Image (cartoon, grey):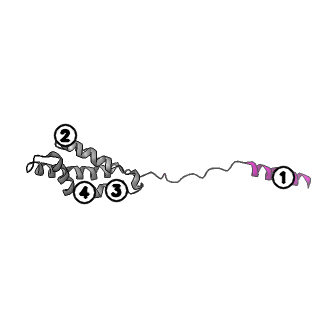
């Protein structure tokens, strides 16, 4: 009888001290790739700005005013991009004000915006 109790005690001690085995993952959860959709929305906004700027610059000589009018004409495309980009971050950390300022600078200096390849 003491052998049975000793054997049971050993099994109990070994069972309590054994490290728990990790549960295998059946499917890896991958973060969605948002680069392609962001690029599409940015290209759509850029194409609108390019077209509007080309039309407006023919009517007035001031590049800054033409750029501002292009931004006003493409505000819905800008809003689509901003809504998608800002969906999961606080508005204080939004990259949109910087993006808009740099976009305007490039538009005024170069006369057009680059269109990036989509995947």
Query: Mark 3 falls on what kind of element?
Result: helix
**Upstream in the sequence, badge 4 or badge 3?**
4
Give the residues in magenta. 1-28
Q: Which residue is mark 1?
A: 9
Q: Are marks 4 and 3 in contact (CB under 8 Å)?
A: no
Q: Which residue is mark 2?
A: 109
Location of residue 32 in the rendering, given as x and y in whole percent from the top left corner: 40, 52
Tell me the crowding category of disc 2: few under 14, some 14 to 19, or many 20 or more residues within 10 angstroms, Cα based: few
| Residue 110 placement (x, y as % from top left) | 18, 40
Tell me: residue 107, above or below residue 73: above
Check disc 3 and report the residue beneath it.
84
Q: Nearer the viewer, residue 49 or 23?
A: 49
- Residue 49 visible from this viewpoint: yes
For the residues labelled 1 and 4, the Cα–Cα distance comes to 71 Å
For the residue labelled by badge 2, is the local secondary structure a helix, a strand or a loop? helix
Residue at image position (49%, 53%) is 27
| Mark-to-mark CA distance, 3 and 1 | 61 Å
Q: CA distance from mark 2 to mark 4?
A: 22 Å
Q: Residues within 10 Å of mark 4 (few under 14, many from 20)?
A: many
**Dot 1 and dot 2 residues touching (CB under 8 Å):** no
Q: How far is mark 1 from mark 2, CA to CA? A: 82 Å
Residue visible at 18% across and 49% down in the picture: 67
**Of callouts 2 and 3, the N-terminal one:** 3
- Sequence-earlier tag: 1 or 4: 1
Quadrant (top left, top right, bottom left, bottom right) of the N terminus: bottom right
């Amino acid at each position: 009888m003491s052998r049975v109790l000793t054997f049971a005690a050993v099994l109990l001690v070994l069972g309590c001290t054994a490290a728990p085995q990790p549960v295998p993952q059946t499917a890896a959860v991958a973060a969605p790739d948002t680069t392609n959709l962001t690029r599409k929305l940015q290209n759509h906004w850029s194409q609108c700005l390019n077209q509007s700027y080309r039309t407006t610059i023919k009517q007035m000589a001031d590049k800054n005013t033409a750029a501002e009018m292009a931004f006003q004409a493409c505000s819905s495309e800008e809003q689509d991009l901003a809504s998608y980009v800002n969906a999961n971050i606080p508005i204080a950390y939004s990259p949109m004000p910087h993006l808009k300022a740099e976009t305007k600078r490039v538009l005024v200096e170069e006369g057009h915006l680059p269109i990036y390849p989509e995947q």
